[in-house]
Image (cartoon, helix red, strand yellow):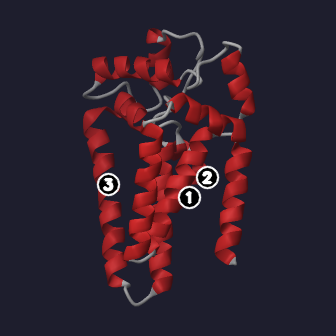
Amino acid sequence: CAALLAVAVLGFGVWSSGSRGAVVAASAGLAATVAIAGGRTIRMLVVGSVLLVLATISVTDVESVVRMLGEWVAPTVNQMVDSGYVDITTGRLSLWSDTLQIIENTWLFGVGAGGFDQAYRIIRSDPGFNISTHAHNEPLQLLAEQGLFVTLCVFGLLVWLVHLSWKGLGRWQNRPDRRYLLAGFQGCLVALLVASLVSFPFRLHSHAVLLG
């Protein structure tokens, strides 16, 4: 009952967020949690389901899938797309393209912490984002602001965290409660990583609590 209540609260939170990326991130995190906490059969079912979803998306129109998500959580976005105000990614593709241009010129040391907005103003190609302090993609913004060396260090830290949690899973084979806690941590991490591809979850203090 507690698990069902948690899923219901999660679903309501995702819906009320009005974010299409939140739907994908929450689904990925939930799938990871179930796969890690469950046994071999459950893992195979989760992996098979994920592969089936990915295969279905790959043979269909991706824009239709995004619009379907939009109809559920953010119907006004689809209305703006139909009216020609924004594209289906709400300007992210052009924002990422400009961010790559920043990285091309400052890939080694970056523009400095918090300097993305100033750098973006210089090379902005789309008026859709007059001011943007975030690239809506954590890896790209990290590389643009901090450079290659810091980015590699951060990714190394994430790999280390995953390694520690996997070791913990093996150590607590006979303690399901501890395994569920570790599975929940890894699921949260997966959700944050997926969300970071289209947003900036690691820059929100409420999310930083999960990593603390």
Residue 48 place in picture, x, y as percent: 41, 59
Q: Residue at x 56, y 23 (%)?
A: 132
Q: Residue at x 44, y 88 (%)?
A: 175
Whether the residues at callouts 1 and 2 have beta carbons within 8 Å, the answer is yes
How crowded is the residue under tag 1: few (<14 C-alpha within 10 Å), some, or many (20+)? few
Mark 3 to mark 2 CA distance (whole Å): 20 Å
Residue 188 numbered mark, or none: none
Residue 157 numbered mark, or none: 3
- For label 1, the residue is 209
Residue 161 lies, with reference to residue 77, above or below; the image says: below
Q: Quadrant of residue 36?
A: bottom left
- In this rendering, does residue 149 appear at all? yes
- For label 2, the residue is 206
Whether the residues at callouts 3 and 2 have beta carbons within 8 Å, the answer is no
Residue 55 place in picture, x, y as percent: 41, 44
Whether the residues at callouts 1 and 3 have beta carbons within 8 Å, the answer is no
Residue type, numbered disc 3: Leu
